[in-house]
Amino acid sequence: MPDEPKASLAKLVAPTGVLRAGINLANFLLVSGKDSDGQPSGVAPDLAAEVARRLGVSLELVGFKSPQELGDAVDAGAWDIGLIGAEPQRAEKIAFTARYDFCYAPYVDIPVTYLVPPGSSLKSVAEVDAAGVCIASVAGSAFGLWLEKNIKLASVQQAKTMDEAFQLLASGKVQALAGLRQRLLTDAKQLPGAGILEGNFMTVQQAIGTPRSRDPEVSKFLGTTVEELKSSGFVASLISKHGVSGQLLVSSPAGEVEGDAKRRKLDAAGSSGKEKQTVAVLGCGAMGSVYAAFFAAAGNDVWAVDVWKEHVDAMQKGGLRVTGPKGDFTARINARMDTSEVPAADLVIIATKASGVGAAAKAAAGLLKADGVVLTIQNGLGAGDRIAQHIDTKNVLLGIASNFGACMKGPGHAEHKSMNLIAIGEMEGGSTKRLEHVVALWSEAGFTAKACEDITNMIWEKLLCNVFVGGACTLTGLTVGEMVDQPSSKSVALACAREAYAVGQAKGIKFSFEDLEAYLDKFVSTVRGARPSMAQDHAARRRGEVDAINGAIPPEAEKVGLKAPINETLANLIRARESAF
């Protein structure tokens, strides 16, 4: 940077001529020790030092005992930049490292989960948010703020420090302790028999903030700097230098706004050199919104098409917000109610309900680039057959979202409960280069994705899960966990799944398991707090996908000389209810 512009920027960032960097001394992953002069050392201090070097000013580290103290100190003007977890509540006073107003640009992600005491009945992250459960957390921490905002049924008790929060668990006053996974590993050693739940309920996204009263150029400079330090490998080198590899994760690139000629795909090892992809998502409900937001956050040019006007308007105005175990972020995308303005796409994702596949398929055919691909992801059976009625399937792939739970919190805001796997395959099976390319695109966008040489088997395995929870939860109005905890409803759900399993075996499906009930129990453990999409539809008085789920089993059974009376009964009851919608 030339000296004159650098000096001008330095005055904006550090008006006193010294960059005062607020750091959270309680975060042992980011402030891991002291140097020979007794000053704090670690990833956060080194990152602050690099910002000061780029500005050509000296550095003063301002330490705080807790993230809450650091965040509150913005009112007193105690620091010029603050290295702290990016949270919407804090963003009211702190402008985080956002290249634009619509997204944070964190430099590292820290997984957060729960520690439960010996003998606890809580076996999964999803089970913690339940009536009668009290969670210990730390007041003002990023995960504490997240819990206050997102926990619906459980209660949250905020302690001043992590040590005090641990004592609440050890003394039996709470049923779960929220915290950084690495810290909980240490706490578990002090409480023999305690267990850390698999998965994360969120990730703390550590960013660099500046007071909102500062010139907007400050946050733009910090955002650009953070992206450069991630892409160059600088942040990764600090993680290695301070011995916290595997405990801190270099954050994914921040999404960027429409029309920015410099928008590009970055990864933690450096610039990937790949051109951005144009991705069209047809059907931007809960799942489609999650897909669109993550693809946009990874630097792709994303166009979302949906018939829900309020949702489209919200996305146009303020971006698409997604909350869940992978954090809370807002991505800027292009939202429309039809495809007339959508450009030719490299990838078209059909994420509509089964009933909307026909119209979406016709639209997709007109959106594809010469080498583009259509990927259809729906629940249940028949997606390939339905799309084949409308377009040539030579450029069509089939996909499933396994162990995903998502819902709409309102226009412009989707929430995902879990994100396990996106499985993708050729309609006719086998492995191809284009299949590998599409899987790579999903992986680069932050999903766990894999290519399947026989996607039909995977579709049937997911179908069993949908058949198990879909009809029973829709008719009872219960969550997945509540439904299986009631012997009367679980017995009906299990009978439906057994019918589907028998049909699949008769059709030659090679299931990857032998114990059906154990397979279903494992699935349920990841989505206990969720409501199946069909149940969500009925709650909103919309018709669901019964004909592709429970209603699909009787005709498939007839093809192989079997019957499926339980599924037929449930499907007929659901259709009767839908007749009033």
Image: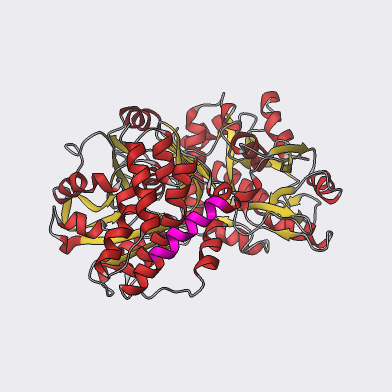
Quick check: is 498 in the magenta stretch? yes
Q: Main secondary structure of the magenta part?
A: helix
Name the side, left or right, on which 350 lies relative to 102: left
Residue located 74% across and 48% down the image? 177
Asked if the magenta segment contains residue 536, the reply would be no
Residue drawn 75% across the image and 50% down it:
40
503 or 565: nearer the eye? 565
Tell me where residue 395 appears, x and y as whole percent: 18, 61
Percent of width and height locating residue 308 = 31, 32
Nearer to the camera, 105 or 302: 302
In the picture provided, is 465 more to the left or to the right than 348? Answer: right
Query: Residue 157 at x, y = what percent?
Result: 75, 37
Please provide percent x and percent y for residue 135. Answer: 72, 43
Q: Residue at x 30, y 65 (%)?
A: 557
Image quadrant where residue 238 sits: bottom right
Residue 306 is left or right of residue 159, and the answer is: left
Q: In the displayed structure, would residue 163 be above or below residue 72?
A: below
- Report the front residue among 340 and 352: 352
Extreme right residue here? Answer: 171
Q: Is residue 287 left or right of residue 434?
A: right
Q: Which residues are magenta?
A: 488-500
Work out whether residue 273 can be spotted.
no
Name the one closer to the observer, 15 or 101. Answer: 101
Q: Quadrant of the C terminus?
A: top left
